[in-house]
Structure formats: C-alpha cells, structure tokens
Image (cartoon, helix red, strand yellow):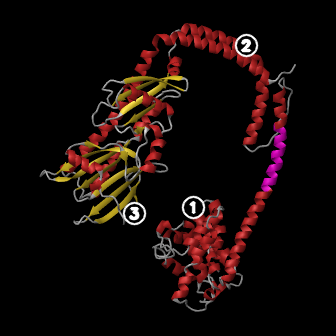
Amino acid sequence: MRITIKKALISGVILLQFVTLTTLLVSSYISNQRSFNSHAHKLMIDYADNVINNSKRFLDTAAATTLLSRELLSSDVLSIDRPEDLGLYFFQQLKQSPHISGIYFANTSGTFVYVQREQGFNEPLFSRKYITFDTNNILESSHLYTHDNNFTQLSVKEITKEAYDPRDRIWFNKALDNDALSWTDPYVFFSSRKPGITSSMPVYGKDNQLIGVVGVDLSLATISSFFDNLDLGESSTAFVTNRLGEIIAYPDQKIIQDTANESLRFPRINEIKNPIALTAWQALQEKTQLFSTGSTATTVTFNFDNNKYHGLFKEFTHHKWPWIIAIYMPEKFFLNELIDNQKLNILFGLVISIIACLTSFFFINHITDSLRKIKIIAENIRCGQFIKTNISESTFVELQQTQYAFNNMIDSLITSRKENEQLHLMLEKTNAETITRLGLATEYKNDSSSNHIRRVSRYCELIALNMGMPKGKAKELRAAAKLHDLGKIGIPEQILSKPAALTMQEWAVMKTAPIIGAKILQDAESATLKVAHDIALTLHEHWDGRGYPNQLQYHDIPLSARIVAVVDTFDTMIHPRCYKNAIPIEIAINKVRELSGSKFDPSVIAAFDHCLMDILNIYKQLSPSIEVHQLPRRCQ
C-alpha cells in the first residue's frame, strides 16, 4: 500500500513534537524557578566586564603609544623636520597595534605628518600625508603617499586644494587646553570617515617650548568587534552609548558607519531600528537617571512582543570614557541553558529517542533511496550535466512522481540549452559585425587607408596579450578598437579631407571628435562598447598630460586607449592620407619609439617592440598593395 509523504511526516512530527515539547516545558519550569535570576545577572555582568576590559586594554594601548611618541619627539629622537623617519616610526606602531587606525603629529606652524591604515585587496595598505604651511599660515604643499605592507612607497599625489589644517581640529586644541594626555569624545575621522576617538598630547622641547601635538586614532569598530565573540543567543544584543545617548559601538557596524557617512555623527538609540534595544533603554530611564547608575550595574526587566527580557547597564569605570555598556537577553535564553534536573531530562530524552528512531526507521529506508536519486539528478543539473536516471518503484507516490518530473525537466533543459547556444552565437556574430560596419563607416569618411581599423584592432590584440591581458579582454579590446575614430563622424568632411595643414579654428573643431565619439557610446550596457567609449574619449590623451580633451596623464588614461594610441599612430604614419604622404616603416618605428614617455606609455612601447615582427606580418597580410622592398630588411 502506498501512502503520501505528507501523511507520514505529519503523523510522525505531531507525535514527536507533543512528547518533546511536554518534556522540555516540564523540565524548564522546574529548573528555571531555582536559579534563573542569579545566573542571568552574573552572566550579563561577565559579558559587560569582558567588553569593558577589552576596550580598556585597547584604549590603554593607544594612550601608551601617545606617551611614547611624545617622549621620542620631545627628546628629538624623532622630529617633524625628518618626516620620512617620523612616518616610518608611525608605520611601525600601526604594525604592532592592529586596532590603531592612525598616528600623526602637527607642530605649531601647521606642518603635519600622518600615517593611516587602509584596506587593500590582498593585504593592508598604508597612506601617509605630509602638509606644510609657510610663515603666513598659507598652505605651502600637501602630498598623499601610499605604501604597501612593508612601507614601500607605491604612489604619491599632490593635493593642491588641501582643506585640512590640524591646528583647527578638536584633538589638537583639546590637548593644548588640558596640557596633558586628552581623549576626544567619539567623532567621525576627517580622512577615513570612520567613527572613532583620538588620544592626543602636547609635545614640549628640551627648552620647555611647545613643539606641537601628537595624536593616535582608535577606530570604534574594534570595540564593536568584541560583540562578535559574545555568544548572546538569538534576540540578544549588546551595545555601548556615550554621554549624548549616541550609539558608539554596536554588533552591526554598518549601521554606525552609514550614519557617519551621511551626517558625520553617531546614530541615536531610536535610529538603529531595534525596538527591543529602545524598550530596554526606556526601562533604564524609568529606573534611574542617565549616567547616574554608579559603579555598580543596574538591572532592568521589560516585556516586548509577549516576551520577557532582562537587561543590564554598567558604566565604564574610567572618567575619561563616560560610556555605558548595555546588554539585554530574552528570559528564554537562560531557560535553555539552565537545566538542573539533568537525570530526568536524560531519561525522557532516551525514551523519546528510542520511540522516534523506531517510528522513523521504516520511513527512512524507503525515502532515502528515492531522495538519493533525486539528489543525483539535481547535482547533475547544477553541474550542467543533463543526465536522466532510471526510475524505480517507490512506496511514496510523490517521490516517484518527482523523479518523472525531473527527467521531463532534463529533456526541456537540453532543448533550451541548444536553442540558447544558437541564439548566443548569433548575437555574438551580429554584435561583432555591427561594430565592424560602424567602424568601416568611420573609416570611409575619415579618408583612412584600406583595412586601417582591421589592422589597428589586430595590433591591439597582439600587444594586449603580450602585456598579460586575459584572452577574453584582449578579444574585447580588438572589437572595441574598431570604433576608435567614431567621433570623426561629427567632423565636417571639408576638414577631414583638407589636403593641407588645419587652421586654429579647424583644429579646435577637430579636437571635438573624442567628445562626439564618447557621447555616441555613452551609457552603453555592452562591455565592448564601454571599452570603445573609453578609447574614443581618451585616445588623444598623452602620457605626459599634454593631450586632449581632458589632459589626463599616466595611468589615469585607460590601458586600452594607451595601446590604441600607439598602433593608430604607427599605422597612420606608414599609410598616405590626403594631407600627408606615407613614411618608411623603419622611420615610423623610430618616431614611435621617440615618443615613449611623452606621448606614449613606455610599457606599451616595450610591448610594441616585442610584437613588432607579428605586427609587420599583419601589415603585410592586410596591405595587399605593399611591395616587399617597402618592409624593413628583417621582414622581407
């Protein structure tokens, strides 16, 4: 006789749930009445102390780093006059203390050295800023450096419009006002836009003259990370608030960071979308004044959504950090943890397990074989292998019907795959032909030599592969390169076909071609057309920044455009145009090399030289009118 899985499972689950729930409720009722209150209070105290002690340890480390830096600067072991040495010392301190996010020093003239931890792709990166002011408090220079994990310099950028003056910052002035080690209230860091606090201290020279202020940034994310290690259970949360009632540490760090990004402040308790935490906070306010809980912990109980919760609020003991650690947990969290009547529960558990095993054994033997076959079919489908399996007789109607359905689905998937493959090939071919035809239209109007775009596109692919570009990306570049002169569609024909040098007015019109090409290709969804957009817009930018339209330089110019610029120039030189004659290939090669480092990227020129023989072979293939004596001797 066949029965449905639904009937079998419902009968078994109802029986097991009834017995199991009855047992758990009786056992929890007996044990919870004895020890819940004392255990709950002790457990939350331990959690709070753990967070406070770990937080204090990190805060003390930041203070110690501040004191050490002050001593080294005061004794002239370190000096802002030696910014490289000072930056290296700051880097070493960041390496030793991973929770410190930045260290810096500013003298009374505004000169500023800052090393900050950044997030790299594979390993940490570090940024270093060096700002100087002249005697009239006018910005003299500002440079931003990036370093790898060994503090090897990776890049440098000059900041011409520097808005940061350390003498205006709260950490600088607070240290001077207190004339001692000082802590800021939590705030959002200027550079990283991350929430944190700063330990700062004035630095005096050997003559007791004020030199400046040293500061150490500590990200509050380090405190929030403690909560990840707390096993508080479901519907339980811990957080830290400051004297303004703002949340400065919370398990979900994204909530704090989002508020910091939007409004440069910390979220309040009613802004974190946690109604349970808000109810706990209101219960504390009803019981005692905010920040008047004393050194001992304050416990509260409250109800939310028909569940009873226990909460604890405890102040940080250090007066410089007037914060409160808050923890709340549902009462049921402790009920599951506190079971004194273990023998009774074990006995009930054994009886229930035996009954459940005997009841389920029969069903398991019949279900597993069919499920195993269904699993094999599903795994094959997931791996793209549409293999049907033999269907065997099963006690359960639904399992057998499911196997039939899977086999029918496989037939449909095989048919759909074939159709999709054909459509994909057709779309690829249509896309490639469309791009080529559009490029040919440009070539027709531009008075280019025959097969110019085909030669340029194949040159690009050769050089891209030589420079390590993946084959798929190189193929994409080959297609996109055909549209490099698309913008010339919008240039009047009398300018493009003029057999003499252009006037200033005509040259100004000619320079609009990149903008026209970019506008034609803008907002394209195709990856190939996006690359073509970049090429059309930046083809005429020079490596040294003297190109147009945007005077980009170095690696701000996309690699695709840097490659096309070299081969387009080369191919244009060796073919005649209405305004010039072709020049010998050897001379063209030398001219291209001479432009390395000024107009062209030296690395692309190196790849061009490496691929030169293959490039000339393509030139021979796609220039049928060429005579052998026109080629360099090595290519004949």
Q: Which residue is mark 1?
A: 468
Quarter that holds the N terminus: top right
Task: Give SS at disc 2.
Answer: helix
Furthest-bottom residue in this view: 500
Q: Which residue is mark 2?
A: 358
Q: Using the rendered image of the protein, determine whether residue 542 is visible from the camera's viewpoint.
A: yes
Give how far apart the Cα atoms at labels 1 and 2 are: 64 Å
Q: Residues within 10 Å of mark 2 (few under 14, many from 20)?
A: few
The image position of residue 556, as x and y in percent, is 49, 66
How many C-alpha atoms fall within 10 Å of the one at disc 3: few (<14), some, or many (≥20)?
A: few
| Magenta part of the chain | 406-421
Residue 632 visible within the image: no
Asked if labels 1 and 3 touch by Cβ distance under 8 angstroms, the answer is no
Q: Outermost residue, front direction?
A: 286
Marks 2 and 3 sit apart, C-alpha to C-alpha, by: 74 Å
What's the residue type where badge 2 is placed?
Leu
Disc nearer the start of the sequence (2/3)? 3
Quarter of the view holding residue 96: top left
The quarter of the picture where residue 633 lies is bottom right
